[in-house]
Each structure stands twice: as C-alpha cells, then as structure tokens.
Image: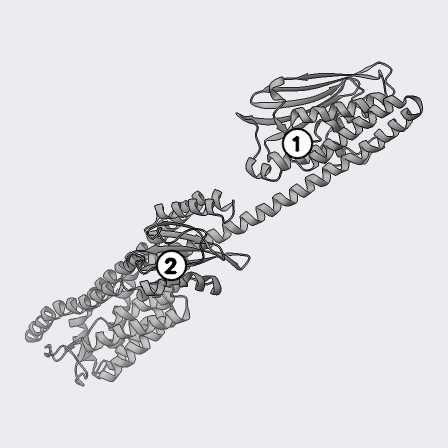
Amino acid sequence: MNEKARSGASVLVHLLPSLFEKVGIIVIAAFLLSYMKPFRQMIGHEHQMSKKIMLIVLFGIFGIISNYTGIEIGNHDIPLGDWHTEIAPDNAIANTRIMGVAIGGLLGGPFVGLGVGLIAGLHRYTLGGFTAGACAIAAILAGVLSGFLGKNRQKHMMVTPWFALPICMALEALQMVIILATAKPFERAWELVQVIGLPMIFINGFGTLLFMLIIQSITRDEARTRAVQTNLAFLIADQTLPYFRQGLNQISCRKIAQIILGLTEADAVAITNEHSVLAHVGAASDHHFPKEGIATGITKKALEQGKIIVAKTKTDINCFHEQCPLQAAVVLPLQVQQKTVGTLKMYFKHPDKLSQVEQELAEGLAKLFSTQLELAKAEMQTELLKDAEIKALQAQVHPHFLFNAINTISVLCRTDVEKARGLLLELSAFFRSNLQGARQILVPLEKELEHVHAYLSLEQARFPDKYHIDFRIEPKLKEVPIPPFTLQPLVENAIHHAFPHVKNKGEIIIQAYVKDDMMHIVVEDNGKGMAGEKLVELGKRAVDSSKGTGTALYNISERLEGIYKGQASLAIESETGHGTQVKISILLNEKGAYVKDVESIYRRR
C-alpha cells in the first residue's frame, strides 16, 4: 500500500506540470485567436446560426487536440509520448477536454455545447482506454449543462470568468463521478480518480478562468472601440448638421469635409453629388477639383450600385492622375429616400491606415449623413408648405377690404367726384403695395405704415369724424422688417368692431417702441371691449360669430409663428366698456427684427 501511495505521488508530481503545459497551449491559442477578426466576430455574434456552427468547429478542434495531447495514465506511471492516437485498454488520459467543452457551451448555448461535447466525446471514445465510455458521456453531458447555464446567465448579464470558473470545476468533478459510476473495474477507476481528480478539477478551472479573461478582454475592447466610434460619429454629426441643412453645395460640403478631415485619420476627404465633385480637402487637392466631373472609378461604381466600395490599392482607386498619392479609400453612398444623391469619400496615403475601425466609422457617418440629408429635405418641404400657407392666409384679407373700398368710392362718385378720384388713386396705391407685399415675407415697418395710411384715407372717407388715429412710432424702428399686412388688419378690426353704436368719438392709438430687446407694435382703442371668454379663442383659430370670424388675428398669429419660430408673439387684452389692446412683440438683434434662418427668408424675396 505504501508502494502504491508513493507511485501515486510520483504520478501526481509529473501530472501537475504536464497539465499546466496543456492548459498553456489552449490559453496561448485563445490569445492568438483574440487578434483575429473572425474569432472576434464569433464571440460577438454567437446567436447567429453560422457563428454557432463556427464555434462548434473551433471548440470541437480544441477538444480533439486535448485528447491527442492528453497525459496517458498507466498503472501508477505516466507513459512517454506527447501525441496519443490510441490509449491502452487498461489506461486513461488526463487532459483539458472538459475546459473546451464547457467554454463552448457557456458562450454559445445548448446547441453549441451539445455539438462540441459530441465532437470531443466521440473522438475520445475512439481512442480507447477503460474510461473511454465514461469520458464520452461526461463530455456530452458537460456540453449540454454548460450550454443551458450559459444561456440562462446571458438573459440577465454577461458570462464572466468568475461565473465560468466554478461551473468548469463542477463539470470536471461530474466527470470523476461518472468514471466511478461506469468505468470497470471500480478499483482501477477509484485509483485513477484519486490520482487525477483534484489536479484536473483545479487545473481545468484555472485554464477556464484564463481563457474567459481573454474573452472578456475581447468584449471590453470591442465595447470600448464602439463607444469611441459612436462618440466621434456623434461629434462629427453635431458639427456638420448646420451645413447639411443647407443641402449639398460647394460651400456646405467643403465645411463638412474639413470637419471630417480634422477629426479622423483620413488623409483626404471628398464629397460629391451625382455628377461632380463638390469638395475635396487634404491630399491630392492639386488634381481633385470641385465642380469637375467624377475623377475616380470607384466613385462612379458607388453611385451606380448604391453600395460601399473599399479600395486597398492605387489601381483600385482608378484615379486618372498618375502621380496621385492616394492608395486606399472607402467610398460611401449618401442616400435620400433610397436614392443615391452623392458620395462621401475618405482617402488614405497608405493602405494600412484604412483599418476596420476607420471603415466602420465611415459607414456610420454615411448613415448619419444620409439621415441628415433626409431631415434637411423634409425641413425644406415644411418651410415651403408653411410659405404657401402664409401666402394663402395673406390672400384672405384682400377681398374683404376691396369690397368695402369699392362701396365707399361708388358712393362718393355721386357726391364728390374729385374726392372719389383721389380715393381711386389711394386704392391703386394700396393694391400696388398689396401685390408687392404678397411677394415678400418681410417689409420695412415704414412700408406697412404707408399701407395703413392708404387704408385709413379710404375708411375715413366712409366715416368722417367717427374716430381719431394717433401714431406714436419711434423713428429708429421705421426700417425694421416686419411681416406685411400686419398693422392694417388690426386697425380694421378696431374700426369695425370697437365703435358700433358708440356716440362719442373713438380713438385708436398705433404705437411702435422698443423694450427689453423686443419691438412692440400696439394697436389700442377705447371702444366697447369684449368679454373674457371671447379672448381665449381669438388668435388661435377662426371662430363662428355674427360680428366676425377672427380670421385676421389668426392670420397674423400664424404668420408670426411661421416666420419667427417662437421669437414673436401676439397678445390681446380687453375689458368690456374699456377698449381693446392688441400687441405684437418681436425679438430684436443688433440689425433689427430677429428671424430664424434670415438668409433663407430673404432668398425667397
């Protein structure tokens, strides 16, 4: 018995370093694989069937190698030889097979675990030895159990090294139990387990810990890289958004290209539309000129196919210039509503600079830029629609005033021909101003005041001495632009709704002044006023009423919102028996009234 103990101790002394050596081989293989893109893709996309099959093959190969390179255990000794194609009937092997099976199952789930277990287990069975059947059963069972445990874990969190460690040790212990339960003779199985049990449990657990630490490092590196790419992509998108809103033109595209060039590793950046280069900054600017035709074959290909084109050689770029320094490029189509409207091109002087990271960043930018172009187009269409709505609202005012003016002049033609003639001239001037205003979004306040004066000359001819108009206009505001047809409808409302059945002479005050960086235009009367419940609806929508619909106030409110985008407001205050005040407030800047996207407003004029 003492001889057996000494023999077992001798086997154990030789077994431990040999097992460490075998584990080291698998860990080194994992470390080398971690630098290979296919392996990283398998780890990151294990839910895809193609990746599952690749995991089965990979870890199945690990299992086969573990069988071949295992340590053959004889009767209290370790036979020589590092590669075993056959095990003696009375011998067994100590190896790292369970480690590969368990890791495959934890990463890939039950399907992968079963596949790896079958490959490793059946191969182990073909090698022979008195534990062949027990080891085969243990490998298959370990694959299935680790697969279910890994799948359940991944529902809530990642499979971590410290989660995998006890599982692998437990599965190795399970293999020892199966050997004791099934291997014959039992005495030989018991002696074997006493010698290899604890070493294999701890060594396989240690190897699993190292292997999973490498997997965890891969996952963290991928996550860190994606985070950096995402932050950079959003930074570029944020800085380029104002220029994409201007559409694809030479000025905006040059700004966009300069931003991308400054924030990426590219040596040159170019942007094209469907027909020509709009901007090219960086290397090769001496022969890649904006507004010339498409210079490279890959750009034409990307436009035609609507797909990403990657070039890794100067020949692939197919530039017409023989001395072009650009040797690698990624060309990405810019699409609006699934139609290719241009390309984004990132060029590199050395192919090695066009890494997978740069390519993925470029792909992300192309998607973001395509989205920005679609939003810019939608925004432009919204502005055009709003413009059309404003024109339609303006047109509603004209017939209302025209009928009143014609009725007034027709009466005067019988009583005062000269005055009627003068009013016809005023009417002509009024509608000439109307035609000019209908083609403009903004006019100087002075022009709007002339419009009001022409209107009042016609109205006061109808109702002489019924009301008095008091103008209180700060002279410096006369050149400030405001929407046309803003004051006249307010004055008309005051005349027609403030003084019915009022015996005393009415008074209307028209003011324009500056306060708190705002220009305030106020039309105030001392008429009958109105009840509070009516004020709630005025300016928000047209209302049904025998005395008016509120269309003029709604018209003005809609135009202020459409033009100033929240930087102007319409306020109405009134009290029964004490008159009404309507105030328009517009934010001022150092040049006058503030208009969002001022340049686009004036381009419509």
Quadrant placement of the C terminus: top right
Mark number displayed over residue 483: 1
Residue 74 in the image: above or below residue 150: below
Instruction: Report helix, strand or loop for mark 2.
Output: strand
Instruction: Tell how many labels.
Output: 2
Q: Quadrant of residue 503?
A: top right
Q: Specify few, some or many for label 1: CA neighbours under 10 Å numbering under 14, 14-19, or 20 or more.
A: some
Percent coordinates x, y for residue 270 in the rendering: 40, 52
- Left or right of 530 in this view: 295: left
Query: How was the colour assigned to the protein in this rendering?
Result: one colour
Percent coordinates x, y for residue 366 in the rendering: 44, 54
Residue 476 in the image: above or below residue 80: above
Farthest bottom residue in view: 89
Mark 2 or 1 closer to N-term? 2
Q: What's the amino acid at mark 2?
A: Val
Percent coordinates x, y for residue 401 in the rendering: 80, 31
Q: Decide if residue 530 is in sight here.
A: no
Residue 286 in the image: above or below residue 190: above
* Viewer-proximal residue among 138 and 581: 581
Farthest right residue in view: 414
Quadrant placement of the N terminus: bottom left
- Left or right of 585 in this view: 311: left
Q: What's the amino acid at mark 1?
A: Pro
Percent coordinates x, y for residue 604 in the rendering: 61, 40
Q: Which residue is mark 2?
A: 330
Q: Specify few, some or many for label 2: CA neighbours under 10 Å numbering under 14, 14-19, or 20 or more.
A: many
**Residue at point 37% right, 62% down?**
310
Q: Decide if residue 249 is in sight here.
A: yes
Q: Quadrant of residue 235?
A: top left
Instruction: Report helix, strand or loop for mark 1.
Output: loop
Real-space CA distance between mark 2 and mark 1, rounded to the nearest whole angstrom: 49 Å
Mark number displayed over residue 262: none
